[in-house]
Image (cartoon, grey):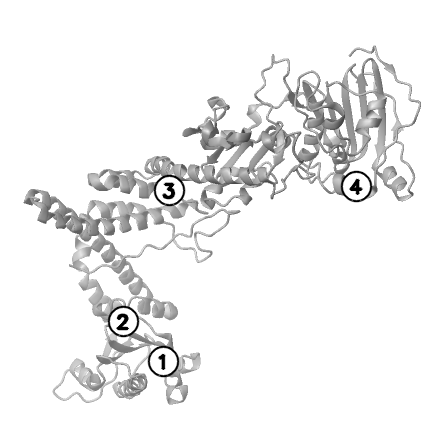
Amino acid sequence: MSQQIEPEKVDQPFTFSVDLAVIESLGINLYSNAAAVLSELVANAWDADANEVDITWDVANGEVTIEDDGSGMTAKELDERYLTVAYKKRDKEGHVSPIHQRPFMGRKGIGKLSVYSLANTVKVYSAKGGLSAGFEISLKALRTHIRDNSGYHPRPIPVPEDMPERGTRIVLSDLNTKRAGVTKAALRKRLARRFDVLKFSATDSARFVIKIDGDPITYADRDDLKRLQYIWHLGASEIPATHTPNVKRSWVIPESETTVDISRGWKIEGWFGTVSSPSDLVDQGDKQESLRNIIILARTRPIQEGILDQLDFNKFFGNYVTGQIRAEFLDTDDADDIATSDRQRLVEDDERVQLLLKKLRQMFNDAGSQWSKERPKEKFRQATEKYPTIRDWVDKRPDGQRDAARNMIGTIASLHLDREVDRPALFKAGVLAFERIAIEDTGKELEKLSQGLTASDVLPLLATSRSYEDALYLQILRSRLEAIERLEHLINKDELEKVLQKHLFDNLWLLDPSWEGAAGDSDMEIALSRIRSGALFSKTEAENQKQGRIDIQYRSAAGVHMIVELKRYGRSSKIDDLVEQGNKYHEALREVLEKRQQAHSGINVVFVLGQKPKVGYLGDRTESQFITEKVQHIDGRVLYYDELLHNAQQRYREYREKKRESTALDQVLQSLDELIPEPSGGKSAGSTEDQKGSSSVSTPTPSIMAKKR
């Protein structure tokens, strides 16, 4: 470094005049992170016509240095400009810098206070025209002088020997460790997003380069660009495709559609884009910085952050959006200053802000529609690579259904899930729903017969319809087999009677195939519990023990009202006791129905036993005939757990034998079943977040309701 500069003689001591409340409100408390503080100092370097500003990030040793090669300041200029809070640069020095004609970023003259949120000691050195000067400010001493209502004079200090002939150096020490606790990598990313200066070439005389520890910030620090899946350029494409390697498709919005006010020449430029997943907007190395953010720039630096929250548009789309948009009309010299002190927000009721919000809302809604159409195509490609059976299923759809099938699979693949392992269950539910709709659509095709279709046109439709219904029926049968196998397991485990109880009441078709869809009635249960002094239908543990039962419940199906009592598997019963109990159930249920004036086609009382009841003398009758006659007057039935299992197995034996001859659709569903995780008994597979606005999806349990042909 050249040493042809002389210490400047200072006739009057430096003076820093400011109220303590100003220091705290506009300095210490206004800036919450190091990047925001450094942004103010980088902006000062820009205004000083610097080509480079270098930040030495030596937090480990308690020091941060910011040095630029700009025009520098004399001792007088340091006193009049730097040490004057609310110095109006644009009023005093014009609207652009003298050398590079850069529009001044500074306007309020308070950015210099930001350093006191990061450091307790600030040293400032500057050199210009062969002279140099320096001073030190101690925040502790400054506070003392302000409280004592005495003028504060920063202490003049010698300028280091390695100080260049031109430029400014600021050294921050005695750091606020909380605010300085950001990594160098995170700092690079934050500054790269906040200054639109990466477009300068290395040979440009007006270039502006930001360095950290001597290493220039470049597009390589723009992780947000690398994560983009789709991008919209405003007016023209400015970002080289090499810096957006994962973009699948880009759009250029014409300049005519980016104009905010044509009469005043107000327009917006820049870009915005979407990522593949909301989690891509979270930087694992810097979780305090959310990339779900559109930064609004004016004069090359941020003037508004967090504008997405002010826009009323597709919130699902909004969970995937990031971007950087220039709106120069927000900061013009002939209009009011509408930026808040921390440059994080704008005065919302200003006309310029309202017009900007209106334009962005319209633009994002249009982009959201494009995204909603395009994204499922890419997600479909990814899903079919991961799940080949899904691709085979879609390829085998009839021509008129294939596009719809692709769109449905792509839409399911696009959903954000907390657990990716739950996606096969969604695909399965989607395939089944699609097939059911396909059956209905096939039926509608038959209406075209009146328009002259031939038999050759209709036969393929009928064949397709039959295959769909058969496939759906196979799904029902498979679920029935699973229920039967579960019943067999529970019957062999006496200690699982409560689980057995729930299983049977959830699958009443095991008792009688005609009871498919039998429903409970909580009001009827309450009415029955109140009758006969409340003891008859009491479900207390003591009463259940006394009656030797697992549970008793009311159900109804197709106008028939049922009382179903499950006895313990090992309980020994007498038929006369069952008849006596059944009479009470039947009488009580009839009484409730009459009081309600509720029509019915019958009352059934069903006992499910593990052991046959003791019957006494049979005469000429068989045991089964005797039991049937004894409960006939109450439409009663006595069933046995083992008998239920045997009958159910017999009923579906044919399917067991032909299970390997399943249809192509059933094979698809089976392959998805193999990928669906077993329930863990913990939290549900899906939950809502986002969040974070993010909207994640709860995974449904696929269900089918269809009738056997």
Q: Name the N-terminal-most of marks 3 and 1.
A: 3
**Secondary-structure class at tag 2:** helix
**Above or below — where is 360 with respect to 66?**
below
Residue 659 visible to an observer of this rendering: no
Residue 22 image label: 4
Binning the other alpha carbons within 10 Å of mark 2 as few (below 14), some (14 to 19) or many (20 upward) gives many
Residue type, label 2: Tyr
Q: Position of residue 48 (x, y in %)?
A: 72, 21
Residue 548, label in figure: 1
Q: Nearer the viewer, residue 271 or 143?
A: 271
Percent x, y of residue 588: 32, 86
Q: Residues within 10 Å of mark 4 (few under 14, many from 20)?
A: some
Can residue 408 be seen here? The reply is yes
Residue drawn at point x = 75 percent, y = 18 percent: 71
Q: Amino acid at mark 4?
A: Val
Tell me the mark number nearer the camera, choosing from 1 and 4: 4
Q: Is residue 310 above or below residue 132?
A: below
Q: Residue at x 23, y 79 (%)?
A: 637
Question: Where is 644 relative to 43, above or below?
Answer: below
Residue pushed farthest left? Answer: 455
